[in-house]
């Protein structure tokens, strides 16, 4: 089966959302990256509920995001801290946003994806998790700062 460009984009978007969920789950439960990866790929991708079916995720992107986020967490957290107000280091922010910054930071720092694409995609993830709040605006500001630092030539 050949996927259209739109289907591929949707799978990449789903992989980013799943990566944030996986990183959050790992932080909250202490599970390993391998265990969470298997759980998501075997049970969460395409999971069916009474009213809807979850999207299929782009498996290679999902794996790369969570593995890079774990393997480069210190550098990603330092970049995030530089984008945050001094009184609010990454350890003090909402754990969902922390997971989002780690997944986005992994993609910004470890892939060739254009930074503006990464920012738009992860701001959309923030909107999915926080539809009523200002978290998406906050995420946009932090990710913009991180992207400009990681890849200034793209701006």
Image (spheres, grey):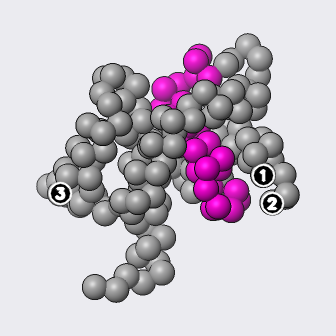
* Residue 60: percent from left, percent from top: 41, 60
Q: Which residue is mark 3?
A: 48
Q: Secondary structure at mark 2?
A: helix
Asked which quadrant contains residue 90, the reply is top right
* Residue 148: percent from left, percent from top: 80, 47
Which residues are the magenta region? Answer: 90-118
Q: Are the residues flagged by discs 1 and 3 in contact, CB closer than 8 Å? A: no
Crowd band around label 2 with a 10 angstrom C-alpha radius: few (<14), some (14–19), many (20+): few
Q: Are the residues flagged by discs 2 and 1 in contact, CB closer than 8 Å? A: yes
Between tags 1 and 3, which lies in front? 1
Q: Residue placed farthest to the front in the image?
A: 71
* Residue 123: percent from left, percent from top: 60, 49
Q: Is residue 103 magenta?
A: yes
Give how far apart the Cα atoms at labels 2 and 3 are: 39 Å
- Looking at the magenta stretch, what is its main secondary structure? helix
Badge number at residue 154: 2
Is 140 on the left or on the right of 57, as rendered? right
Sequence-wise first label, 1 or 3 = 3
Is 45 on the left or on the right of 100, as rendered? left
Crowd band around label 3 with a 10 angstrom C-alpha radius: few (<14), some (14–19), many (20+): few
Crowd band around label 1 with a 10 angstrom C-alpha radius: few (<14), some (14–19), many (20+): some
Query: In the rendered image, is residue 109 in sight?
Result: yes
Q: Secondary structure at mark 1?
A: loop
Badge number at residue 58: none
Q: Which residue is mark 1?
A: 151
Is 143 on the left or on the right of 30, as rendered? right
């Amino acid at each position: 089966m050949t996927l259209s460009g739109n289907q591929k984009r949707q799978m990449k978007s789903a992989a980013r959302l799943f990566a944030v969920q996986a990183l959050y789950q790992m932080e909250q439960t202490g599970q390993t990256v391998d265990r969470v990866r298997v759980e998501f790929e075997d049970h969460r991708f395409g999971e069916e509920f009474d009213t809807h079916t979850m999207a299929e995720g782009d498996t290679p992107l999902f794996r790369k995001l969570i593995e890079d986020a774990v393997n480069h967490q210190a550098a990603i957290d330092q970049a995030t801290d530089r984008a945050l107000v001094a009184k609010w280091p990454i350890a003090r922010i909402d754990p969902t946003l922390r997971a989002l910054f780690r997944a986005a930071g992994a993609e910004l720092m470890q892939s060739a994806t254009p930074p503006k694409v990464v920012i738009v995609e992860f701001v959309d993830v923030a909107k999915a998790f926080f539809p009523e709040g200002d978290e998406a605006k906050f995420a946009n500001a932090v990710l913009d700062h991180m992207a400009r630092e990681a890849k200034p030539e793209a701006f």
